[in-house]
Amino acid sequence: MKKALFAPLLLLVALTVGCPSTSNQSVLVNVSYDPTRELYRDFNEAFKAHYRKETGESVRIEVTHGGSSAQARSVIEGLEADVVTLALAFDIDNIAQRTGVLPLDWQQRFPHNSTPYSSTVVFLVRKDNPKNIKEWDDLLKPDVKIVVAHPKTSGVARWAYLAAWGYVLKRELGDLTKLHDPDAADEVAVAQTKAKEFITALYKNVVNLPPGARSASQTFMQNQQGDVLLDWENQAELSINEFGKEKCEIVVPSISILAEPPVAILDENVDKRGTRKVAEAYLNFLYSKEGQEIVAKHYYRPRDAEILQKYTEKGNFVSVEMFTIDDVFGGWQKAQQEHFDDGGVFDQIYSVGR
């Protein structure tokens, strides 16, 4: 099954790499996660024009999309990408550790730990919010049916899981800094137990676990399953743009997680394929004024403060309290091992929840 899943992706890259290039054209392969199709469609066109103007050279860009962890596995299994633009730092860490095609300190190469934009997790509900879902607690109502992608394959699913867990810790502790206070160890232990109970109850209400954010959105919007979709902020906005405000609306909870999708160059691949120059230019362009404008137009929160303020005033982003994965969970390596590895908390609670 795994070979069948990745065969089309490997074929795409084989054909791309095997195609002869003209002397002034490069072929760049970007392996990305589920909801970035529209973003990179527009970004790629802008970059190609920019790169031709700056260098006189043309570039063809091939992009594949899917659940973030599934995309990382495809690279590990042989998909020869030049760059990856994934949902989780852990997924790129996994590529580095298992293949050696990029260094373990890859996050130090670009600003903001190689995350040119951020996002968060919101709720997408039916028009007029018939189940009156306003907060994480409302997801536990017995009549609420939840759609969310699968944490084993999807980045947003892991961000959503951790956002809900962190909400309970904040609700119980009041101040998340208590997580690092030895004198509050007993109080923290009780809060962690309540968070696990909360997540267990939440997944009892989950009616569908699609493999990625885009398939989860299709399940909710096109197949009309569920009362609420836990989704990326940008994906939720795109759903409203596509299906109309008469179909759905966004609910922003009181607190959520700062999701930071990272990018990286795969050194061994770009050196082998002679694409390092264009790969570096490609990712640097994400941080440029033009790149950040495109990011913001697609409802990703840009790192450029001026552009972020501009699009906040235009209504692209709402103010929401956010915590980081480092502050609450000790970083992605620890969170992955504890919650999402085989036999981790998710496996425990989902088994109980079903």
Image (cartoon, rainbow, N blue to C red):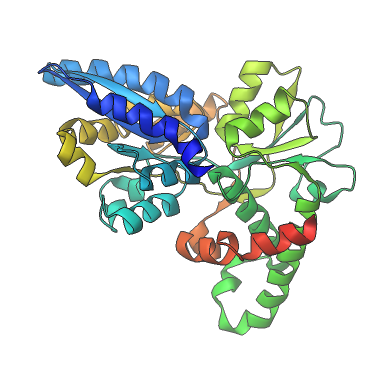
Count of picture labels: 0
Instruction: Tell me: 278 left or right of 289.
Output: left
* Horizontal and vertical percent position of residue 276: 17, 36
> Can the viewer see residue 292?
no
Question: Which residue is painted at 65% across and 34% down in the image?
Answer: 216
Residue 159: percent from the left, percent from the top? 57, 49
Of the 4 image quadrants, the one containing the N terminus is top right
Residue appearing at x 63%, y 38% in the figure: 231
**Does residue 352 lie above or below 18 as drawn?**
below
Instruction: Note whether residue 146 is visible.
Output: yes
Identity of the residue drawn at 32% across and 52% down: 107
Residue 116 location, x and y as percent?
Answer: 37, 39
27 and 324: which is toward the camera = 27
Above or below: residue 201 compared with residue 307 = below
**Direction from residue 175 to residue 114 in the image, left or right:** left
Q: Quadrant of residue 44?
A: top left
**Residue 207: quadrant of the picture:** top right
Residue drawn at x 21%, y 45% is 267
